[in-house]
Amino acid sequence: KALAALRSELKKENNLKAQNRILSGRLKEEFRNKLDYFKKANEKEIAKNLKQKEESLEKKSEKDKKKVLVLGDLILDAYHHGHLLGKSVADGVTTVGRGHTSRFTWGGAGLLVRNILALGGTVSFISLIGNDDFASRANEFNHPRLKKVFVQAPTRPTTVKQRFWIRDRNSFEWHRFDNSPLSPVLRSRVMRAFRAELASAQKVIIADYRHGLFSPALAKRIIRECARRKI
């Protein structure tokens, strides 16, 4: 139909120049149509390739996020805020405050874990806690991309650093910890937990805050195991 219409139009023009002008116009129009077609097809192909690359990067990113293993000393940071009542009637020296609020958060290797989570990573966190009320406080922190692997030590306290604030002043600190080396039984439990989590780890971070979790021998065993698995 298009060819028949073109022939009909050319027959109306006896002038060769006019016929050439018609043919030239039709060719330009056809070229533009083809160019638009290929341009749209190319844009679709580019968009498809970009989408595939984005999906591939997202999958790789998700895969990478699941491979961070952190071993280290969890320190429970406690912040107690209160109001000043005055001096103790017993000695006239000790500052007396009335408790108002208490806040608990992860410090030490726990702070490192929180930072990795804030950056979008996924973490398995191996640490040591005691069998006390502070262990329950330490366990309160949860995150969708966090796996807590806490080895409980029945005879050791949870490492905690308490700060007592009256008005805007840190008036007093009370720390509770045991920096002595782990028993052979606890070392064995830590190592078992490490091996179990290492199977899915791409990166391993050792965060030693010198509160007894690591000994030179245990650190060397962990490093050898990482080297054996080329991590």
Image (cartoon, grey):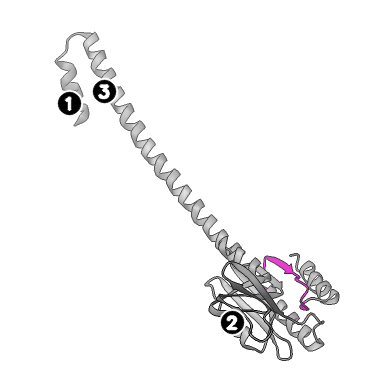
- Name above or below for residue 50 compared with residue 78: above
Q: Main secondary structure of the magenta part?
A: loop
Mark 1 vs mark 3: which is more N-terminal?
1
Q: What is the secondary structure assignment of the residue under circle 1?
A: helix
Are the two marked residues, 2 and 1, in contact with CB atoms closer than 8 angstroms? no
Across and down, in percent, residue 43 comes to 40, 41
Please report the residue visible at 81 percent of the width from the left and 87 percent of the height from the top: 183
- Image quadrant holding the C terminus, namely bottom right
- Check disc 2 and report the residue beneath it: 137
Q: Is residue 43 left or right of residue 173?
A: left
Q: Quadrant of residue 75?
A: bottom right
Q: What residue lies at 44% left-to-right and 49% top-to-bottom?
A: 48
Magenta range: 199-213
**Residue at the location (28% across, 25% down)?**
29
x, y percent for residue 134: 63, 84
Mark sitting earlier along the chain (2/3): 3
